[in-house]
Amino acid sequence: MLAYIKGRVAAMDEESLVLENGGIGYRILAPVPALNSLSKGQEARLYTHLQVREDAMVLYGFLSQDDLALFKLLIGVNGIGPKGAMGILSAVPADELRFAVLSEDTKAICRAPGIGVKTARKLILELKDRLSLEEAFEAASAPGGAVSPGQAADNRGEAVQALTALGYSGAEALRAVNAVEGGESMDTEALLKAALKSMMLF
C-alpha cells in the first residue's frame, strides 16, 4: 500500500519516529541503526511495510529497500514476527546478517534480544537458500572504484572466506573486510592483508 514515505522527522523515541508529510504525522517503528542515523527536523525517506492487525495498523520503516527486503524475509520465517525481525535488524546490520546466515554463524544472530540458538538455527535453515554472498558485498561496494561492484563483491567474499578459514567468526570477518578503507578497489590478497592488520590492532 505504502512503498515509502518522505518527510520531516517531527519526533523520535527509542523504537520509532514520527515522519511528517503533507500535514500528517506517520508513526513508524524502525531498527535502532536507522533511528541512530536520523535526527529531529531532518528530511528522510523510509521504505515501509504496513502490518494490519485486528486491533491496529503498524508501520515499519527502513532507510533502504535492502533492509526492507530482509525484514520481509525474516517475518516469513515461522516463529519470527515483526517485533522479532526488528530486534534482529537492530542488533545485526543487514549485510552482516546475510553473511551470518550464509556462514551459519548462530553466535552473531543470537546477539538479537529473544533469539536463542534454536531459533537462530531455524532462521539459518529457512533463509540460507534465499540469500547470496554476492548481495552481502555488492550492497557495501561503492560505485566508481577501480573494479566493478560485482568483482568487488567477489574479492570481499573471498577475503571473508579466508578469514573464517583462519578461525574468525563470519561476523568478525565481515566487519573487518567492510572496514578496510578503499577496499572496493583492492584485490583479494590486499583486502585480506589489510583486514588482518586491522584485526590485530584491536
Image: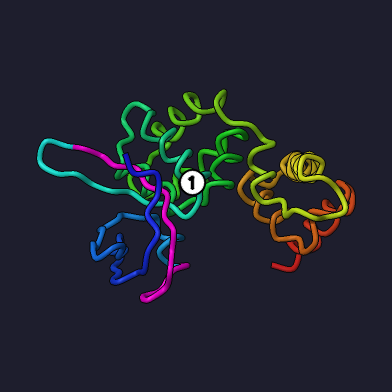
Q: Nearer the viewer, residue 182 or 200?
A: 182
Q: Nearer the viewer, residue 146 or 107?
A: 146
User: Horizontal and vertical percent for residue 193?
Assistant: 86, 55
Q: Residue furthest left?
A: 55
Q: Quadrant of residue 197?
A: bottom right
Q: Main secondary structure of the magenta part?
A: strand
Q: Residue furthest bottom?
A: 41
Say whether residue 56 is left or right of residue 49. left
Residue drawn 37% across the image and 64% down it: 7
User: Horizontal and vertical percent for residue 62?
Assistant: 43, 52
Q: Quadrant of residue 114?
A: top left
Q: Is residue 172 above or below residue 158?
A: below
Examine the rendering and report whether any part of residue 39 can be seen: yes
User: Horizontal and vertical percent for residue 185?
Assistant: 84, 54
Q: Quadrant of residue 98?
A: top right
Q: Is residue 33 above or below residue 147?
A: below
Q: Is residue 67 above or below residue 119?
A: below
User: Horizontal and vertical percent for residue 154?
Assistant: 79, 39
Q: Nearer the viewer, residue 23 or 109?
A: 23
The residue to which callout 1 is attached is 67
Q: Does 114 lie within the magenta span?
A: no
The part of the chain drawn in magenta is: 37-52
Q: Does 41 lie within the magenta span?
A: yes
Examine the rendering and report whether any part of residue 17 can be seen: no
Q: Identity of the amino acid at label 1?
A: Asp
Helix, strand, or loop for circle 1?
helix
Residue drawn 64% across the image and 43% down it: 170
